[in-house]
Image (cartoon, rainbow, N blue to C red):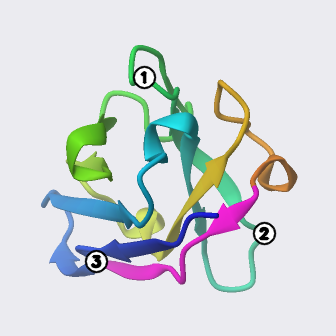
Amino acid sequence: QVQLVESGGGLVQAGGSLRLSCAASGRTFSSYAVGWFRQGPGKERVFVAGISRGGFRTYIADSVKGRFTISRDNAKNTVYLQMNSLKPEDTAVYYCAASTGPEPYQLASGYDYWGQGTQVTVSS
């Protein structure tokens, strides 16, 4: 079992940057693929980015491609989401999730563990 804790959210002006962190407990974090999802007010939870177990393959949603990057440091049991050129439409609660599969899924149902979420608000 793994527990996930997100951090790094906050209020930022449009065009600014934030880096979210997803810290995991447990010594087997490298056994999990990790995804970042977001859920805006009144919207469904959607895939933003994902990274494979070893960090060699990453997947970025079209809506944030070119602005967001995902990375991981398994020695620190942490996955990062670097968000640049933020837009008001990026405002949402951001969640990280871990999957026992080798690759991250784009569907939320593919994940076994979830963090509590961190709020990102982008002002215009």
Image coords of residue 18 (percent x, y): 18, 62
| Residue for point 42% across, 22% down | 54
Q: CA distance from mark 2 to mark 3?
A: 19 Å
Q: Is residue 58 visible?
A: yes
Q: Are marks 2 and 3 in contact (CB under 8 Å)?
A: no
Callout 3 amino acid:
Gly
**Most common secondary structure along the magenta stretch:** strand
Q: Residue at x 28, y 62 (%)?
A: 21
Residue furthest toward the top? 56
Q: Which residues are magenta?
A: 112-122
**Dot placed on the residue nearer the N-terminal end, 2 or 1:** 2
Amino acid, disc 2: Glu
Q: Is label 3 in a helix, a strand or a loop?
A: loop
Which quarter of the rendered picture does the C terminus lie within? bottom left
Residue located beneath label 3 in the image: 9
Q: Which residue is mark 2?
A: 44
Q: Which mark is residue 62?
A: none
Of the pair 14 and 104, the residue shown nearer to us? 104
Estimate the x, y position of residue 51 in percent, counting from the top left. 48, 31
Q: In the image shown, does 74 or 10 lie closer to the viewer?
A: 74
Q: Secondary structure at mark 2?
A: loop
- Report the Cα–Cα distance between label 2 and label 1: 29 Å
Q: Secondary structure at mark 1?
A: loop
Q: CA distance from mark 1 to mark 3?
A: 25 Å
The residue carrying mark 1 is: 54
| Mark 1 burial class by Cα count in 10 Å: few <14, some 14-19, many 20+ | some
